[in-house]
Amino acid sequence: MGQITLKQITKNFGDVQVIPPLDLQINDGEFVVFVGPSGCGKSTLLRLIAGLEDTTSGEIDIDGRNATEVPPAKRGLAMVFQSYALYPHMTVRKNIAFPLRMAGLDKDAQNAKVESAAEVLNLTDYLDRRPGQLSGGQRQRVAIGRAIVREPDAFLFDEPLSNLDAALRVNMRLEISELHQTLKTTMIYVTHDQVEAMTMADKIVVLQAGVIEQVGTPLELYHTPKNKFVAGFIGSPKMNFLHGSFSAGYSAESIGVRPEHITVSKTEGTWKGVVGVSEHLGSDTFLYVDIEGQKTAITVRSSGEVGVRHGDTVFLTPDPEKIHRFDNQGLRIA
Amino acid sequence: MATQHSRSAARFMMAPAVILLLGWMLVPLSMTLVFSFKKYLPLRGGDLGWIGFDNYVRFVSSSAFWPSVQTTLIIVGGVLVITIIFGILLSILLDQPMWGQGIVRILVIAPFFVMPTVSALVWKNMLMDPVNGLFAHLWKAFGAQPVEWLSDASLFSIILIVSWQWLPFATLILLTAIQSLDSEQLEAAEMDGAPPLARFGFIILPHLARAITIVILIQTIFLLAIFAEIFVTTSGAFGTRTLTYLIYQRVLESQNVGLGSAGGVYAIILANIIAIFLMRIVGKNLDA
Ligand SMILES: Nc1ncnc2c1ncn2[C@@H]1O[C@H](COP(=O)(O)OP(=O)(O)OP(=O)(O)O)[C@@H](O)[C@H]1O
Ligand SMILES: [Mg+2]
């Protein structure tokens, strides 16, 4: 079981309120991702759940039990830290066995569990090495191994992949997702990378300055963002926002169009503009088009073989079905 | 990236310093070696010629030799144990966030800046004096008979004085080591269910191992040579005659330079054996 409920929790550091009153429900077996810009309080929220920080007010329930005052070790949660936090003077085996040893398990039971975890994580050949003799990805797996053997009710990850290179990150992303499929344990995962959030999550929690902007499935957030912040944060490249005369026709303060919902033509279209930079990724081309009356360039995502160059005049047509309208509060008009 | 040229230029420019340093060390060292093979009694006939290894044999066979080695080892060992145990405790304490941290840290370092002679005198006259000392008053306040520290518990008293001087050094080095410990490791251990004592034993202590060996190495080298503390407190009486003190007595009190020099050579050999031994340990620790 791994059901976690946050009720009106707040956190102050001195006079600064980092988390204003916040409610959140995390269901058993869910893969929840906290995403948001740097400094928005993701790590703080995770550490509150872990018990490494004390809440200023509010209540944390784990499996229906009030756990606000329960010390971290007794909450039944396991955490994987951004720096891995492996014990440098212990071998991989001892690192993974550490929580079992602290729980007073006998040596044989420890070894059996360590070995089965090592098998799952492809660490069998490295059990007698020290963390210093492992690569970044292997260290990451050891940290996960140390979390798995405890058979916790929920796993907490704090940006576990941010120290890895791009290729390895994709691999580990898949491995963690697979692990979730196998274990079916609740996982809470903190990242500032919206691609990780979109690809891994059952449920995404978008945070800004300690406030939950929206909670929903990846596709909900993509298709029906609640406000301009979520609309701009989710999706890559970012959504384009247009104001003034552009949005007047839609009876909205501003409108938003995703780069993939704009078609480019050399002959006709709604908006006329000049192509600035174009980025060729092979599969896609990102065009940055300056249109009259709009300060920032419009990003357009088109197919790989679009035949336009820097300085060409083009016409852009947004898909009318996919235009998001926002009122003067920045909220999306349904 | 030093080129051949810049390397020889560097050697050339370092030469004066190296020559000065070598001279500084080599001249007394070779004089000691020369004297150790001579019968040299400044007030009783002066240089009486070469006598081979006589001085060496006499120094070792003297009844004062082995007790002095033993005293030296007890003092060095005692001070090491006290400074390291209390150094670890103090550094953990100082690492906690608290009010006035900066001032407290400076106060803790303060004893290190007091000259050994001065601190030994302060201890002798203000704290340990059986009539006027602070400890005597304290004992009397509880109705107990004041302890004659420097005669009844002479070795312990000297260990106490020297530990007080070296505690700041140990604390400082251990504190910087503790501060370099990744706090996430402690948090991970906490989540893994390790209670405070286990966190200390499994995480903090292994992390400090290297700093501890360095403290042991450096302190041992300096502690083998302590002199002022003994000179101003007991003058080597009551079983506090260390090897260094014995050499001093041979040369200045018995006016036997040759015999003292032989003792000096023994001391050099002893210090080097310990240094090599400790270097090995540190080297092993630095590799890991
Ligand atoms: N111990 C602390 N004392 C004071 N302020 C803190 C402390 N820890 C965090 N903060 C503040 O709380 C806010 C949220 O920090 P937090 O570490 O949760 O951000 P984050 O979302 O994890 O950012 P990042 O993506 O950069 O890791 C920040 O403004 C930070 O300055
Ligand atoms: Mg963070």
Image (spheres, helix red, strand yellow):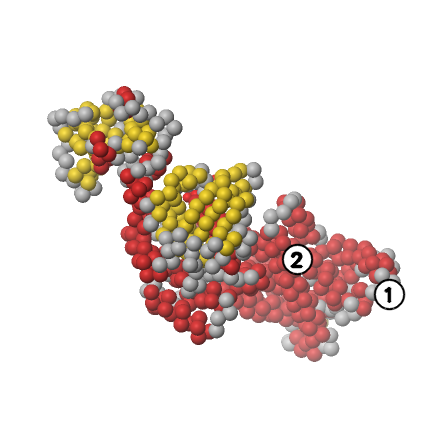
Rounded to the nearest whole Å, what is the CA distance between mark 1 and mark 2? Answer: 29 Å
Element under disc 1: loop
At numbered mark 2, what does the secondary structure look like: helix, strand or loop?
helix
10 Å crowding of disc 2: few (<14), some (14-19), many (20+): many
> For the C terminus of chain A, which image quadrant?
top left
Could you tell me residue A107's position as x and y percent? 46, 74
Q: Is residue A80 above or below residue B254?
A: above
Q: Residue at x 57, y 70 (%)?
A: B273
Front tag of 1 and 2? 1
Q: Amino acid at mark 2?
A: Leu
Chain letter for the residue marked with disc 2 in the picture: B
Residue A327: x %, y % from top left: 35, 27
Label ID, residue B145: 1
Q: Which residue is mark 2?
A: B167
Q: Residue at x 49, y 61 (%)?
A: B192
In this view, B169 is above or below A294 = below
Residue at screen point 66% across, 75% down: B56
Q: Looking at the picture, which amino acid does disc 1 mark?
A: Gln
Q: Residue B54 lies in what quarter of the image? A: bottom right
